[in-house]
Image (cartoon, helix red, strand yellow):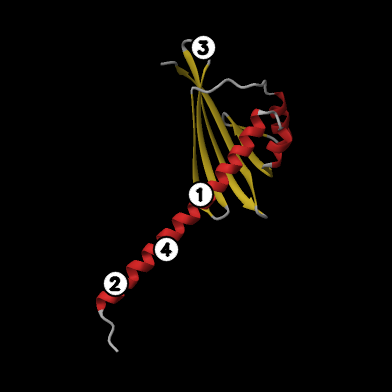
Amino acid sequence: MKTKPQYITILLLLTIVGSAFAQKSADLSIKTEIELAVAKEQNAFKNGDCDTVLSMMDDDITFLANGNKVPSKQVIGTFCNSMPRPFKTPLSDNIEVFPLTNTSAYTIRTLEFSKDDTTNIQELVTKIWKKTDGIWRITHLHSTAKKMNAN
């Protein structure tokens, strides 16, 4: 039996489209899981629930604050507990989620706050998330804040 070239082409196209759809669906699922983890971690941080914040961080987390390495997870806990709350409402707040694999993703968050009439503070926060034993944890966190002219 001869196979016609157009049938092979159609079968190949269907395979490619099906694979692309499956990948988009997997990425969307990972993205949704990370968005939920981000919301849980951010709400805990806002509310001063530092035990929950720390539970969402890997024991060997790498944390850089304005380029300076924070020596341990315990120091992060001290920092979290010492933050004055409630926080100012940001002028802007945007989080982007980028799935990498079924067990890894990263987020980029940009925030801007008013410091005074002439100065704003812009903060850039990147986090690498890893899923281990079904739980998403932050393995790397980098936060940089800088002064900007207010517009």
Question: As shown in the figure, which amino acid type bears the numbered disc 4?
Answer: Ser
Q: Which residue is most to the bottom? A: 1
The span from disc 4 to disc 2 (Cα, nearest Å) is: 15 Å
Reading the image, the residue beneath label 3 is 116
Question: Which sits in the foreground, 8 or 58?
Answer: 8
- Identify which amino acid the numbered label 2 is placed on: Thr
Q: Are marks 1 and 2 in contact (CB under 8 Å)?
A: no
Depth check: give the residue in front, 119 or 64.
119
* Neighbourhood count class around disc 1 (C-alpha, 10 Å): few under 14, some 14–19, many 20 upward: many
Q: Which residue corresponds to the image point at 51% horizontal and 34% vertical from the top-left? A: 109
User: Callout 2: 10 Å neighbours few (<14), some, many (20+)?
Assistant: few
Front label number (1 vs 2): 2
* x and y, in percent, of residue 3 in the image: 28, 83
Q: Are marks 4 and 2 in contact (CB under 8 Å)?
A: no
In the image, is 1 to the left or to the right of 144? left
Q: Amino acid at mark 3?
A: Asp
User: Which mark is first along the chain, 2 or 3?
Assistant: 2
State which quadrant residue 23 falls in. bottom left
CA gap, disc 4 to disc 3?
A: 52 Å
Give the Cα separation between the discs numbered 1 and 2.
31 Å
Residue that label 2 marks: 9
Q: Amino acid at mark 1?
A: Pro
Which label's residue is closer to the chain start, 4 or 2?
A: 2
Q: Secondary structure at mark 4?
A: helix
CA–CA distance between discs 3 and 2? 63 Å
